[in-house]
Image (cartoon, rainbow, N blue to C red):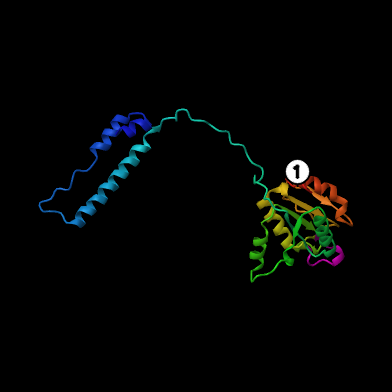
Amino acid sequence: MDIYTNLFTGSTEELAEEYSHGISLPLVSMHEPSLGEQISELYKDIDRKIHRIDSIIERLELIPLRNATITETVPISEPQRTLAKTKKVFVVHGHDEIAKTNLEVFLHEIGLEPVVLHRQADEGLTIIEKFEKHSDVGYAFILLTPDEVSYVKADEQKGDDARQKEYRARPNVIFEFGYFVGKLGRSRVCCLYTGDVSLPSDVSGMIYKEFKNSIEEVAYSIIKDLKASGYADV
């Protein structure tokens, strides 16, 4: 019973004695027990031992580990991942073809490979399968453009002029935005917007870059962020 006296404090000798005395004696019978009876008795004996150990453990205090090194846990605000050695960057976009093309051209010019989902082969995949396949990138650009008009249900019966409207990006853009924030971390997601589009309010710490006519307006800021994320060659 040394294992118990080594691992636990308290009246361990008494408890070890309790365990030893509780061990069942071999099965005694007037006749030779069958193999089935021996197996059944063995299972019962193991079950009794387990219950006895559980009862003892509940009354013991563990000994503090000797020479244990306590490491401080530092909270991580976002995923810490090694930047993938790839020049592929994902472009999430809505219906603004001009802004999307403008961004693609800019990314090509600085030596990156923009991945635009609808330009990739379908290969018989569903949309989500295709998206997941091509999302293996080191950085993502989100284009928030005012593609849809929305208003609260309470304004449904009001006239069009009386409704409080919002211009929003398409739902797939918001979904992919959240996906990449979770996968890559906020520091590797660049969110660009134009017009009166409503910006998501629950993504704390995000910096949104506004442009009016061209991506070139925020080119310096984009390049600075890319270099900070490990893209030293842009």
Q: Residue furthest left?
A: 30
Q: Residue furthest right?
A: 213
Kindly tell me whether residue 165 is visible in this rendering: no
Residue span colored magenta: 155-167
- Circle 1 packing at 10 Å, graded few (<14), some (14-19), many (20+), is few
Query: In percent of the image, x 23 and y 37: which residue is there?
Result: 21
Label 1, on which residue? 228
Residue 207 in the image, given as x and y percentages of width and height: 78, 47
Q: Quadrant of residue 18?
A: top left
Residue type at the position of mark 1:
Ala
- Compared with 150, 207 (above or below) is above
Kindly tell me whether residue 100 is visible in this rendering: yes
- Compared with 111, 97 (above or below) is below
Q: Quadrant of the N terminus?
A: top left
Q: Is residue 33 left or right of residue 125?
A: left
- Compared with 179, 65 (above or below) is above
Confirm whether the magenta stretch covers residue 79. Answer: no
